[in-house]
Image (cartoon, rainbow, N blue to C red):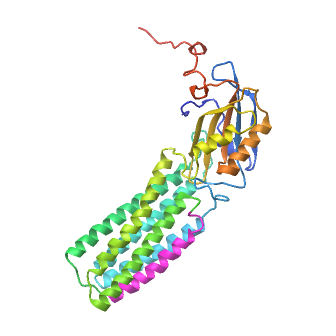
Amino acid sequence: MSRPGHDPRRHDGSAHEAAHPEGHVHDHPANDHPAHDGSTRGGHADAHDGHAGHGPSGHAHGPARHDRAFAIGIAINVAFVAVEAVAGWRIDSLALLADAGHNLGDVLGLVLAWAGAFAGRLAPDDRHTWGWKRGSILAAFANALLLLVAMGSLVWAAVLRLQSPEATQPGVIMVVAAIGIAVNLGTALLFMRGRHDDLNIRGAFLHMSADAAVSAGVVVAGALVLWQGWLWADPVASLLIAAVILVGTWQLFRDSLHLMFDGVPSSIDLEAVRAELEALPGVDCVHDLHVWATGTTEVVLTAHVVMPGGHPDDAFFRAAAARMQERFAIGHVTLQASTEPLMAACGGPKAPPSAAREPVLSDSH
């Protein structure tokens, strides 16, 4: 499927990404692509920067793998779920059993994030020319949904507990919750370095940080129950923690949903990108500019550039790709050049000339 206004005959760099080593730049001469209307010629360039797989956040210095972090995080969280479930069953604590079920959801969140990261590394093929990079965006979105549902259930349980406070065994609950702090915080730290560069990793980090905060609240509430006998301390602490977590989770939900619908990554100013392209030598106007994320670690740009002085050489495309990478962390750039405007945005025709089109034939019976 081609994007609105974009030449469907352009070569897609992702389709042959696997066939070339990273770090290459290949530029097609201006006469290598026929024009939209048959009277002008297009130039095309793809850029793949091998040393910087900058993601939508614009800060990464290479799409780091977190396989070991995922494996360790899933293993220790599965072990903690087992311990918490056994403890809840032994002391007949509904709260601990419920939290064990919640932590089992955390394991599912980590599995989803790992699956998304793995999918993003699968090689493109003839049926999936971009590969499966969008899997990491879907995983981040799923993690956000899981967190929103988990916090919603926590709020509901807290409201019910406020209406009917119940006596608990705060000592045992505090010990188990303290173990939970260590487990969840330790898992979150495994993803701390990648949280700014990869939305999927940010989802895993936020998920585990949220659980560490919930466990901390349980410890504080348990201490207040032991000290003052305030049974309402537990649900009130839960409500406060849920409110804080919901703020961060909502941002994750919005960002991942935005990228799912090919939105411009929040770190990129589209008008600044346009101005940078128009500042290139010989460029009079830029139209049909598209910037989107194929996954949580790669940003793509396509655009038409109007160059009245003539079609550019290979050096122009290399310079343009390098500038987009350096200024905006856009690692995949496709440009098409023409000597005359093709779109109304640059003073060109409002629609492609009908004379250049073949007549549409229809069957009549």
Decide which of 287, 60 is in the foreground and name it.
287
Q: Residue lying furthest left in this view?
A: 164
The residue stretch that appears in magenta: 170-195
Evaluate whether residue 147 shows in this view. yes
Q: What residue appears at the point 70 percent right and 40 percent down from the top-left corner? A: 46
Q: What residue appears at the point 45 percent right and 55 percent down from the top-left corner? A: 141
**Which percent across, then down, holds residue 215?**
40, 77
Please, is residue 143 above or below residue 79 in the view?
A: above
Majority SS type along the magenta span: helix
Evaluate whether residue 114 shows in this view. no
**Which percent across, then down, holds residue 79?**
46, 77
Residue 179 in the magenta stretch? The answer is: yes
Task: Tell me the quarter of the image containing the N terminus.
Answer: top right
Q: What residue appears at the point 77 percent right and 32 percent down from the top-left corner? A: 312
Task: Tell me the quarter of the image containing the C terminus.
Answer: top left
Decide which of 6, 311 is in the foreground and name it.
311
Q: Residue lying furthest bottom in this view?
A: 227
Please, is residue 252 above or below residue 77 in the view?
A: above
Q: Quadrant of residue 311?
A: top right
Answer left or right for 24 relative to 56: right
Residue 118 in the magenta stretch? The answer is: no
Q: Residue lying furthest top in this view?
A: 365
**Which percent across, then down, holds residue 118?**
57, 57
Please, is residue 59 above or below residue 309 in the view?
A: below
Answer left or right for 231 relative to 175: left
**Which percent across, then down, holds residue 356?**
61, 15
Please, is residue 256 above or below residue 92 in the view?
A: above
Query: Total of numbered circles in the picture?
Result: 0
Answer left or right for 132 relative to 280: left
